[in-house]
Image (cartoon, grey):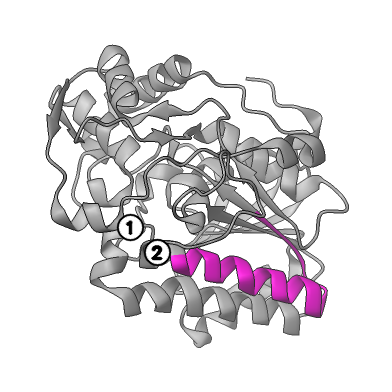
């Protein structure tokens, strides 16, 4: 695939936190050939990190295995990497919605404290790096305007989404009060290569894909008529790189999703059609009823107008490309981690 000029960074010094995870590793694969890339990752539980995600670029990137929530991390090689960085993509996070409800303080430690430490170290280093935060559209909670835009009220229904909102608010404070060059990009239900497909706790779309690869049942709660916006990971990387290279957007928030929403039922059927498995409808579990938000459909007008971004991957194309990546590597990804 040939990527647009505005989506490219050349000769940069890139720091990717959480670079062993789904999104961070896909960024690393895009950037490694023409940039110096440093990955900081601690393989934190509930983060979806996988060492195999660096296959093919492991000799082209530097990996520092440190915990961003530990203040001692910010000396030595991490300090040097941040000091010299032209771009920082802060992808590190515990990403499990149900995991955050079971372990809220651990989620705060990683997603809140770790982010605040990182931003404050960039401030003390007087960094001029562009900092891009992959936030989440789940920060908004139940939809009161259709579609949801960047000014929509935020009433998140789970701890993970609260802490992603906290990350974003930290970033905006550091941008507006301390001059940090930060941009937040809210992403919606990513799927694609290098995702964690072994557990429903790390995202239902990729878990459904894992079930399809095993020719197993895809269990849909209720009738599955709630609408969702989803996005193929390459399109998400395009958006993050556009946010990293577009001038005049410091302190801004952008939403990124496929503007064509789809019901959970239709998505499950598309996965079985393109990958495998069978759809089975079951009653809602009680714990999921409490966090269910109903329809969630997002406007991407601002990202289109200000970043020049639009998704380029159709659902069937994205699912087929995802299956083609995982089939020869199934033993590396259908594991408990």
Residue at 62% from the left image edge and 70% from the top image edge: 169
Across and down, in percent, residue 165 comes to 53, 65
Q: Earlier in the sequence, mark 2 or mark 1?
A: 1
Please indicate whether residue 25 sits to the left or right of residue 30 in the image: left
Magenta-drawn stretch contains 243: no
Residue at 28% from the left image edge and 23% from the top image edge: 327
CB of mark 2 within 8 Å of CB of mark 1?
Answer: yes
**Label 1: which secondary element:** loop
Q: Looking at this rendering, what residue extends furthest in the right direction?
A: 248
Q: Residues within 10 Å of mark 2 (few under 14, many from 20)?
A: many
Q: Which mark is residue 96?
A: 1
Can the viewer see residue 58? Answer: no
Asked where in the image residue 46 lies, by quadrant, the reply is bottom left
Across and down, in percent, residue 151 comes to 67, 55
Asked where in the image residue 257 lies, by quadrant, the reply is top right
Across and down, in percent, residue 227 comes to 41, 33
Which residues make up the magenta segment? 162-184
Residue matched to label 2: 160
Decide whether the magenta segment is chiefly helix, strand or loop: helix
Q: Which mark is residue 210?
A: none
Across and down, in percent, residue 183 comes to 71, 58
Can the viewer see residue 327? Answer: yes
């Amino acid at each position: 695939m040939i990527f647009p000029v505005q989506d490219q960074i050349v000769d940069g010094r890139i720091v990717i936190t959480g670079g062993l995870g789904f999104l961070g590793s896909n960024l690393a694969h895009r950037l490694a050939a023409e940039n110096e890339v440093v990955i900081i990752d601690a393989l934190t539980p509930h983060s979806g990190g996988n060492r195999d995600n660096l296959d093919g670029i492991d000799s082209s990137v530097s990996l520092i295995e440190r915990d961003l929530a530990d203040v001692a991390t910010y000396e030595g090689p991490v300090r040097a990497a941040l000091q010299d960085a032209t771009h920082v993509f802060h992808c590190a996070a515990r990403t499990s919605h149900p995991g955050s409800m079971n372990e809220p303080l651990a989620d705060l430690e990683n997603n809140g404290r770790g982010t605040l430490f990182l931003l404050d170290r960039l401030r003390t280093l007087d960094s001029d790096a562009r900092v891009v935060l992959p936030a989440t559209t789940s920060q908004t909670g139940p939809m009161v305007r259709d579609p949801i835009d960047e000014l929509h009220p935020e009433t998140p229904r789970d701890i993970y989404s609260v802490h992603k909102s906290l990350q974003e608010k930290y970033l905006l404070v550091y941008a507006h009060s301390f001059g940090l060059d930060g941009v937040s990009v809210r992403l919606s239900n990513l799927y694609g290569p290098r995702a964690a497909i072994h557990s429903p706790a790390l995202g239902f779309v990729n878990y459904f894909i894992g079930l399809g690869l095993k020719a197993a049942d895809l269990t849909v709660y209720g009738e599955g008529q709630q609408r969702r916006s989803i996005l193929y990971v390459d399109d998400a990387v395009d958006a993050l790189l556009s946010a990293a290279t577009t001038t005049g957007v410091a302190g801004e928030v952008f939403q990124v999703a496929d503007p064509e929403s789809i019901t959970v039922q239709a998505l499950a059927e598309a996965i079985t059609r393109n990958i495998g498995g069978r759809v089975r409808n079951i009653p809602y579990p009680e714990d999921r009823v409490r966090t269910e938000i109903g329809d969630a459909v997002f406007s991407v007008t601002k990202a289109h107008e200000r970043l020049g971004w639009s998704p380029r991957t159709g659902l069937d194309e994205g699912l087929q490309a995802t299956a083609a990546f995982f089939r020869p590597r199934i033993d590396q990804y259908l594991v408990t981690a």
